[in-house]
Amino acid sequence: MFAKDHRLTKRAYKTLIADLPKDELEKALQQVQQITKPTKKKPLQLTAKVKIHPTIEQKEILWALAENCRLIHYFANKERKEWWDKNKHLPKKKQDKESKPTYNKQSAELPKLKEIYPRYQQNYSKTLQDTLKQLEADYRSFYTLRDNGDEDARPPGFKGKKYFTTIHYNQSGFKIQGNKITFTHFYPTKETKKVNLTFEMQGKFTFANKKVKQVTIYQVHKTKEFFLSIIYEQTTPEYYNNDIYQAIDLGINNLVAAVNSHEGKTIIIKNKRVDKYWQPKIEEVQKKRDHCIKYSNRWHWYNNKLSKMIAKQANQRKDFQHKISKQIVENTKANTIIIGDLNVKAMSKSKKNDKKNKKSLHRSMQNSGSIGRFARFLTYKAEKVGKKVIRISERRTTKRCSYCMNKENKLLSERTISCDCGLVINRDTSSAATLLQRFFALLAVSQKKRLVVRQRLLKEFREKFFSDTQSTIKRKFLQQWSWADSQRIKS
Ligand SMILES: [Zn+2]
């Protein structure tokens, strides 16, 4: 049934490229070129979330500093809003640009304000500037929405006094020593002896050799816990192409179906379906809540419980994605990982779903959102260790047989496809194999190599991947293992 050398016919080879519309082909080629012509490297910016435990005295200081930020935000926002109310009806050209509040104008007034109201001297001065900068950013996106014709867009709102206003320390005003961080402040006054804002940062992060760009202090209102959000730069090892590739089909049932160019190995990792565990429990609590009088004590109790469960579910899903993406990146010998371009996938999926009800559309959008996050995790974790994730269109990869590239596949089940050429294979694995072969074709196009040369990688992969007989391929996917099985929650 199978030819001995597993060569791809010329016609089949051409479909790998011909399946792509022009824009998708161009996008894919741009991605592939990253391998041959590496772009200039920027340090990777990462964010860490760290819990802190302020003492009562420190809490008092934090609240005072946050309140000053809130007041500055209030007055600056009021000025901007008044300008907007006066000018919004006018065409853009006639708006009074002279009187329009800007970050530069507002921050220039800060020194004067500090003289009149000494309380603002309590803050490290840049934290007040950064509040104004944040406001400017919010207004910029508001104006953009308006310019794009969104009449419902409202200007940024005011911050409530009950809520802790986030304090931004940009570039300076903080000092990190070991696992301790100290923030500059002058509460209650510049002259008096003051309590230090020094916090221990627990957890696995160390910032000793990292360039920290920004630290923000915030409070989660519901739990009253304080956190730092720390943006730091990390230099990453240089990427080099070791000519080993891994293609991954990302999905909902199988989070990962990967094939490896080097050994022809396949890996399948089942998604941990946390929703199957949580959904019945969530629905039960929801039902109980809806039987209560709205906003009554009991209603609040159930509502609180409900939001905690939903948060827990989301956290478990995220943790699982972190864990798997890390393992994928670290365990593969490939320095180049190829995944489907999700923007393209999401579009073609939503079209199909138009006919179905809204719920399934909603679910599919949620799903593509969750896959998108997993793809981002993969991308930055790869970058951290000097590997590269590139995205190419996966159009028709699920429909074609990865061996002969014919389209008419019989669907044995949701999971398995069988082709007249004799291949019986897991659908997601097949999809990954086609994606990898498309990548090789694209690589050849971008390098303008002649047919003989450009078939080399393809040939090597196919020989390893398809060298088994049909039955062994069948067996292969039955034996596939999954990390999810060991989890407490059954999938
Ligand atoms: Zn076939």
Image (spheres, rainbow, N blue to C red):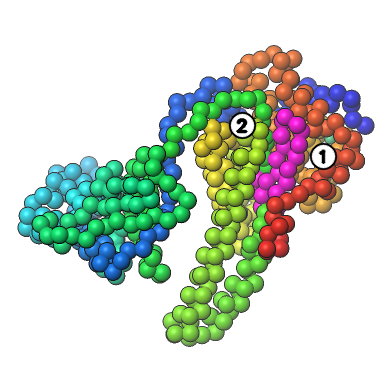
Tell me the crowding category of disc 1: few under 14, some 14 to 19, or many 20 or more residues within 10 angstroms, Cα based.
Answer: few
Residue carrying label 2: 336
Tell me the crowding category of disc 2: few under 14, some 14 to 19, or many 20 or more residues within 10 angstroms, Cα based.
Answer: many
Point out the quarter of the image occupied by ligand 1. Answer: top right
Position of 200 compared to 270: left or right?
left
* Residue type highlighted by circle 1: Glu
Which residues, given as a range, are shown in magenta? 250-270
- Vertical placement of residue 95 versus 155, above or below: above
Based on the displayed image, in which of its 4 quarters is residue 114 positioned?
A: bottom left
Residue carrying label 1: 408
Based on the displayed image, in which of its 4 quarters is residue 278 positioned?
A: bottom right
SS for dot 2: strand
The residue lying toward the viewer, choosing from 400 and 303, is 303
The residue at 66%/49% (across/down) is 255
How far is the residue under mark 2 from the one under mark 1? 31 Å
Based on the displayed image, in which of its 4 quarters is residue 187 positioned?
A: bottom left
> Percent from the top left, x then y, of residue 208?
39, 42
- Vertical placement of residue 445 versus 104, above or below: above
